[in-house]
Image (cartoon, helix red, strand yellow):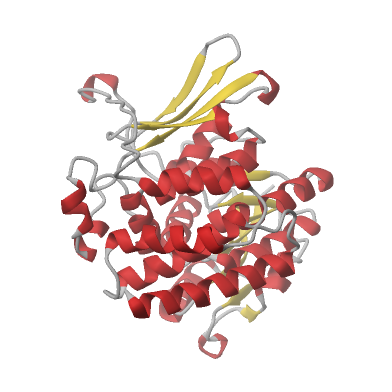
Amino acid sequence: MKRKISILGSTGSIGRQALEVIEKLNDKFEIIALTGGNNTELLNEQIKKFRPKYAYAANYKEVIGAEYATLEEICSNKENDIILVAVSGRIGLKPTITAINNGIDIALANKETLVMAGDIVMPMAKELGVKIIPVDSEHCAIHQCIKDIAQVDKLIITASGGPFLHKSIEEMKNATVEQALAHPRWNMGKKITVDSATLMNKGLEVIEAHHLFNMDYDKIEVVVHPQSIVHSAIEYVDGSVIAQLGLPSMHIPIQYAITYPDRFEGIKSKSFSFSQIARLDFEEPDWDKFKALKIAYQAGKTGGSATVCLNAANEEAVFAFLQGKIKLFDIISTVEAMMEKHNVIKNPSIEEIFSIDEDIRARSRELFVHI
Ligand code: MG
């Protein structure tokens, strides 16, 4: 039986790689729907090649070869066995909730879903028996290591350290957009690449891990591992540490998430060789240089709407940085300023989450004018 899948964000970095996986495993999948943002040209090429029943794009008039459907319609279509949520940003949240409400399993590549609304999404999925399989390589690694979460004492999330790992704070302060986008290990979208340069990405991943694996923040540790071979690890109560290793390729976690619990050769290009990896290094993160990580932990521990504020301020600031409006460290000071003023709501509803998100974004943009 073919697994019926829809991909939200098929023209993005994760979406394109997911289609490469599916192309290799074409006898295993049937595509129900593909959705894109503004790159309708690529979406149309994908439609021609993969023949989904439905498609959605921001500019739907240009979609050729598939029936138009909204994100909500696609996510409430029970033909789907699984939906890969690979859109970036808050746009992923509502469709994911719709899919969960319809009992459809989720391969989750959208961080905002859990950072903004983990306290709503995870209990809902649990109650409805919906699987949330992480695509993010670190969480995918932890997912692969865990047999019984009750016996796990600690999650160890690895971070490559990004392009500024061995640069001084001064150099990092004055970094250009180009330097921030030159990630040494991973080829990803622009927003997440800047987040990886500040280590905010790791902070968001700590929050994701807290929700996905229901683990206290005190039991989630971040370790810098520049080679990105150990994708993350867990420590059991008895001191045994289990790690997941592999070459740094997003194809592997994507394939794992959409084929789970099965495994196939699929996209595998070469065998892993310990002898070809000269060394594996690990070090503690520099908390002064990568303040974003500290702020993210604080937001996570505060809980409620604090992580909504963190995410919104950060995303707006990253966009402003990419447009050359502010410097790299202004991203962090923007987030700090917003967090300081934010009145935390304990258990925000989805509507409150979106309104806080909107409010923080508007205030952040006001701040950039004065920087
Ligand atoms: Mg990651």
Q: Nearer the viewer, residue 59 or 178?
A: 178
Q: Is residue 138 left or right of residue 261?
A: left
Residue at the image point whose x is 40% and y is 67% from the top? 317
Residue 88 in sight: no
- Count of picture labels: 0
Q: Is residue 125 left or right of residue 254?
A: right
If the image is split into quadrants, where does the C terminus sit? bottom left
Q: Nearer the viewer, residue 203 or 162?
A: 203
Residue 281 drawn at (x, y percent): 27, 25
Among the 4 quarters of the image, the one containing residue 20:
bottom left
Residue at the image point whose x is 44% and y is 43% from the top? 294
Residue projecting furthest to the right: 127
Residue 77 drawn at (x, y percent): 75, 66
Residue at the image point whose x is 67% and y is 77% from the top? 70
Compared to residue 322, the image places residue 310 above or below, namely above
Q: Nearer the viewer, residue 171 or 62?
A: 171
Residue at the image point whose x is 61% and y is 13% from the top? 237
Compared to residue 327, the image places residue 188 above or below, namely above
Residue 15 drawn at (x, y percent): 48, 60
Among the 4 quarters of the image, the one containing residue 346:
bottom right
Residue projecting furthest to the top: 238
Q: Is residue 69 left or right of residue 36?
A: right
Q: Nearer the viewer, residue 180 or 233?
A: 180
Residue 40 drawn at (x, y percent): 46, 80
Residue 121 in sight: yes
Residue projecting furthest to the bottom: 61
